[in-house]
Structures are given as C-alpha cells and as structure tokens.
C-alpha cells in the first residue's frame, strides 16, 4: 500500500490517471446510449451496478476496511437512492430521447447544484467568483434547453432534458447529505455500500417496469455491461478516491470539466451526434460555471 500511495503522490501520474478516468467516463456515455438497442434502460442500469457493486464490495473486503457502523446504514441508503437509484434511473430513461453527449453535459452541471445546496444547508459562504460561476452555469443550461424548446423539439426531448437536470440536482443533494452524515467514513466504504443499496432500488424499478422485456445477449451487450460496471463504476471510482486526497481544488474539478467534453466528442465521433451552436455556447458557459463554482476562494 505504501508504494501505491507513493505513486499516487507523483504529479505526472496524477494527471495521467485523471485523463484516463475522464476518458473512460466520457466514453461510457456512448455505451450507455447504445446499450438501449439490446435491453431496457433500467435493466441495463441494474446489470451495470450489480456488477459494479460486487467489484466494489470485493475491493472493500480486500482492503480490510470493514463494515460501516449500524447507525450509518440508513444514511447510506439515502445516499444510494439519491446518487445511484434516482440519477441513473432518470438518466437511462432520458437517453431514449436525448443524445449521449448532451446528456453528459447536462448531468455534469452537478457542481452548480452542490454549490447552491452547500450555501443553504452547510452555510458555506458564496464568493462573488463562485456566484458568477453558478450564474454562468445556469445560463448555459437555459441556452441548451431553451434552444431545443424554440426549435420545436418534441415534448419527449424537453422532458428528457429536465429529467437529466433533475438527476444532477439529486447528485448534488447526495454530496451534501454525504458531508452532513457520512463524512467521517471511508470514501471506499461509502461508495461501495451506497452503490449496493442504490442498485437494489434500480433493480426494483427494472423488475416492475421491464420485467417481461427480453435481453439480447451479444458480445457488444456483455462488453457494455462489463465496461461500465467494472471499469467505469468500480475501478475508476476506486482510483479516483485514492487520488482525491492528494489533489488541490482546481485538479479536483477536472472530471466535471472533462467528462462532458469527451462525452460530446465521442457522441459526435462514434454516434454521429450533431453538436449545435447552442450546445457549444451552453457548454462553454456550463463548464466555466462548474470550474468557478468549485473554487473555494475568490
């Protein structure tokens, strides 16, 4: 473990790992979108997070972290519902109607909502810089969604976009709840158990909504489940938690900034998604807003 910690403290290795993690997370949006050809959205989420939760629990067991205290279980259930069940139930449903790249952009507005909730519930002061970041980000969201409304997109597209923004709000709320109730626990422990409880919620939704729908098993569908479950959900989060203690605030915002960039790029490259002027303008505002609102000083 000491040698791993030593590697994690090397700046060059930190940047390499950050780039790999954000590439994987951005690419995962393409797989999430394409997986809808093989199974229902909630079925895919359930399979993905069952796989991820098993791997995360194995990592916790091998690390000898132990079980969380019994008093923490209800709070882990709440975080699991907010961060895994709600977010990915809504996101996967919305991907039926919205491009993968645009979906990643809307979801990664999460730090804007975290900043607002931190000011309300944690009484964190909002500096002029962070206030400007929140205004920038919300303006970007309104441009992206407003352009679709004005271009007479179908109601499904508008509703899908609203659902993804709601997912970002839920994710932001889970971050604040974690800091209030679970900040004293190991991040590995929290992520493993919240994923476990959140997976149960997704599995129940999949059983009720898609219990009779067939699953088309193929090399592609198995790859999609394995990649997003093992690599994107379990291993990337594990490495990220190992890195985060050695990163400054600017570096810690990198995933939020780069994931939607890669999501938009891979959506254009692999799925032929069109990146409109409104999406480009909205992206610049949202990503700058996320960066500024994540700063603790200024």
Image (cartoon, rainbow, N blue to C red):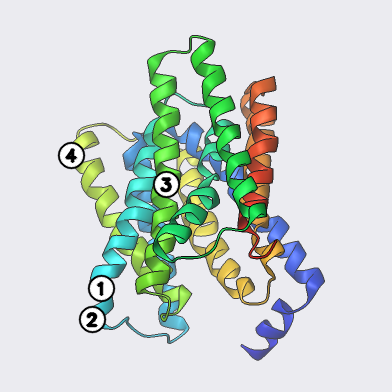
Q: Report the residue that reaches farthest toward the right.
A: 12
Distance between the alpha carbons at the discs numbered 1 and 4:
25 Å
Quarter that holds the C terminus: bottom right
Going 38% across and 25% down the picture, which residue do you hit?
Answer: 159
As drawn, is 76 to the left or to the right of 103? Answer: left
Residue behind mark 3: 169
| Nearer to us in this view, 60 or 276 | 276
What is the crowding at mark 2: few (fewer than 14 residues within 10 Å), some, or many (at least 20)?
A: few
Q: Does label 2 or label 3 sit earlier along the sequence?
A: 2
Q: Secondary structure at mark 3?
A: helix
Distance between the alpha carbons at the discs numbered 3 and 1:
23 Å
Distance between the alpha carbons at the discs numbered 2 and 3:
28 Å
Mark 1 in CB contact with mark 2 (< 8 angstroms): yes
Q: Secondary structure at mark 4?
A: helix
Residue behind mark 2: 70
Q: Indicate the position of residue 115 as horizontal and vertical percent values.
A: 52, 55
Mark 1 in CB contact with mark 4 (< 8 angstroms): no
Label 1 or label 4, whichever lies nearer to me, is 1
Q: Does label 3 or label 1 sit earlier along the sequence?
A: 1
Distance between the alpha carbons at the discs numbered 4 and 3:
25 Å
Going 35% across and 64% down the picture, which residue do you hit?
Answer: 194
Say the numbered circle drawn on residue 283: none
Q: Does label 1 or label 4 sit earlier along the sequence?
A: 1
Residue behind mark 1: 73
Residue behind mark 4: 208
Residue 64, visible in the rendered structure: yes
Label 3 or label 1, whichever lies nearer to me, is 3
Going 25% across and 73% down the picture, which residue do you hit?
Answer: 73
Q: Indicate the position of residue 203 as horizontal and vertical percent values.
A: 26, 49
Q: Does label 2 or label 4 sit earlier along the sequence?
A: 2
């Amino acid at each position: 473990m000491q040698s791993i910690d030593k590697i994690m403290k090397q700046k060059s290795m930190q940047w390499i790992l950050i780039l790999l993690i954000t590439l994987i997370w951005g690419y995962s949006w393409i797989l999430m979108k394409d997986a809808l050809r093989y199974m229902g959205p909630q079925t895919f989420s359930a399979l993905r997070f069952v796989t991820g939760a098993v791997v995360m629990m194995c990592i916790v067991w091998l690390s000898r972290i132990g079980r969380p205290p019994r008093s923490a279980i209800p709070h882990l259930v709440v975080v699991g519902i907010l961060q895994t069940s709600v977010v990915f139930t809504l996101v996967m449903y919305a991907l039926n109607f919205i491009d993968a790249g645009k979906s990643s952009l809307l979801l990664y507005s999460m730090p804007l909502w975290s900043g607002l909730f931190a000011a309300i519930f944690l009484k964190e002061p909002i500096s002029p810089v962070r206030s400007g970041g929140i205004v920038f980000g919300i303006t970007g969201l309104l441009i992206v969604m407003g352009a679709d409304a004005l271009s007479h997109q179908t109601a499904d597209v508008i509703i899908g976009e609203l659902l993804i923004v709601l997912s970002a709000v839920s994710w932001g709320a889970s971050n604040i709840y974690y800091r209030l109730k679970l900040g004293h626990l190991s991040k590995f422990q929290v992520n493993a158990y919240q994923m476990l409880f959140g997976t149960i919620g997704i599995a129940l939704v999949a059983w009720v909504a898609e219990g009779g729908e067939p699953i088309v098993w193929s090399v592609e569908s198995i790859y999609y489940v394995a990649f997003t479950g093992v690599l994107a959900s379990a291993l990337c989060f594990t490495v990220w938690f190992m890195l985060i203690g050695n990163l400054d605030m600017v570096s810690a915002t990198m995933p939020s900034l780069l994931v939607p960039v890669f999501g938009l790029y891979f959506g254009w490259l692999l799925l032929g998604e069109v990146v409109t002027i409104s999406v480009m303008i909205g992206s610049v505002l949202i990503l700058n807003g996320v960066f500024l609102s994540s700063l603790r000083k200024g």
